[in-house]
Amino acid sequence: MARSIGWRAGALAATIVTASPALAEDYKPVACTAHQLWQGRPLHAPVTPVLEGAIPETALPSATAAQLDSLFDTMRSAARAQALGIAVGRTGEGLWSRIEAPAGKRLWWASAGKTFVAVVVLQLAEEGKLSLDDSASRWIKGVPNGDAVTVRDLLAHTSGVFSANEDLRIRAKPHYLPPAETLAILRRHGAMFCPGSNWRYSNSGYDLLAMIVEAVDRRPLPEAIAARIAKPLGLTSIVALRAGQPTPDVVPPALSSGTPIDVSTVGAGGPIAGDPADMVRFWSALLGGRLLRPATMNQMFGQLHPMFDPGTWYGLGVMVLDVTDGARTDIWLGHAGGAPGASAMLAWSPADRTIVAVALTGDGPAAAVANAVLKSLRAPLR
């Protein structure tokens, strides 16, 4: 079933980081000694992630840029965004981007940053330094069902590992969770299901991946991301945030009411800040085969698990969205992100030969902005 993307489509991005509350008493913890076969809803057919042509480092045609500039102003007003960044990369044509944010500040990409974590893990697997079939217990002690949970499960959110940010004590008083506290919370709640048998979003799964990266690559995750991705690709605006450290150069999330999230508390569940143009460059490099081998890319999009909403699917650190807009049905490859006060969307639309990157602060949904951008590019220029 395809997913309609409109102004009411903010639910996806808004739940990517926060998800829904759960207590240990809400489910019976499950003890498993072995990985299990999938028992959830039907999977999506595998998707072949191919970028057909390169996105050149040239500006889009002036008429297209003018069209996008006009749309930017409309979208900022419609989304009620206090800060907004949009970038568009089109194969064979070029790149356009615009940011309205405080000077010197980077935009936060929330869970869209999980793809960076996945790329680092998959590069380590390609180098033979770990296996996606390694148990979590090989690298970390004390993970519930750790002998059965695999690295692949952590990437795909099929581990059954509780997401520690959903603990009601943590929700009442949010703060950065160091590894020891994260593991203590996971043990207190126990596993939600046997690994491999179902799907449920777990930011703590990515915190565990950060621990594994540090153990295997012998450097913290932010350093690994910088050395393996940002520096080789020349992504000068991209920084991997150090969990628990101040983030003065990041635009803080903002809400019209309520309390926005503190970016410094998120950890590996949302570790990236930077400009939208560099996020387009990252996805262009990823889909263009500059970061991972083709066989590894096929694994990222090979087993796609049903997510929260109809038409949303999860692979290994990536998402696939079946998008319907009236009579038109498309597919997006990318990753959404969101938390109270911030929303982000990275989407490669093969039908449009376009990568769109949107990040904003405020109440609006980045996915709807991305869809409006793609629709605008399909319309005849005036």
Image: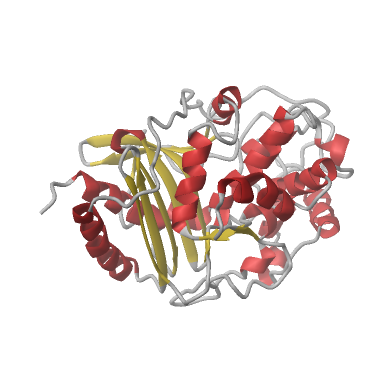
Q: Between residue 176 and residue 356, name the one nearer to us.
A: 356
Decide if residue 342 is on the left or right side of residue 162: left
Looking at the image, the residue that sits furthest to the right is: 141
Q: Is residue 41 visible?
A: yes
Residue 59 horizontal side relative to residue 149, left or right: left
- What residue sits 75% from the left and 42% below the top? 191
Q: Is residue 196 left or right of residue 372?
A: right
Q: Quadrant of the C terminus?
A: bottom left
Residue 369 as seen in the image, left or right of residue 154:
left
Q: What colouring style does the render use? A: secondary structure
Q: Is residue 129 positioned above or below 381 on the image?
A: above
Residue 193 seen by the camera: no
Q: Quadrant of residue 130?
A: top right
The location of residue 280, given as percent across then percent down, is 45, 48
User: Farthest residue in the left direction?
Assistant: 382
Closer to the camera, 201 or 214?
Answer: 214
Name the spot of residue 246 as percent of width and height, x first: 69, 73
Q: Using the image as rendered, state which of residue 41 and residue 366 is in the foreground.
A: 366
* Residue at 35% from the left image edge and 71% from the top image edge: 80
**Going by the picture, which residue comes out furthest to the front?**
58
How far from the left and from the top, in percent, is residue 14? Answer: 48, 58
Quick one: 191 or 286, which is closer to the camera?
286
Q: Dividing the picture into quarters, in which one does residue 161 lie?
A: top right
Above-or-below relation of 248 to 358? below
- Name the spot of residue 261 as percent of width and height, x first: 58, 69
In the rendered view, tell whether residue 196 sits above or below residue 365. above
Quarter of the picture holding the N terminus: top left
Q: Residue at x 67, y 67 (%)?
A: 264
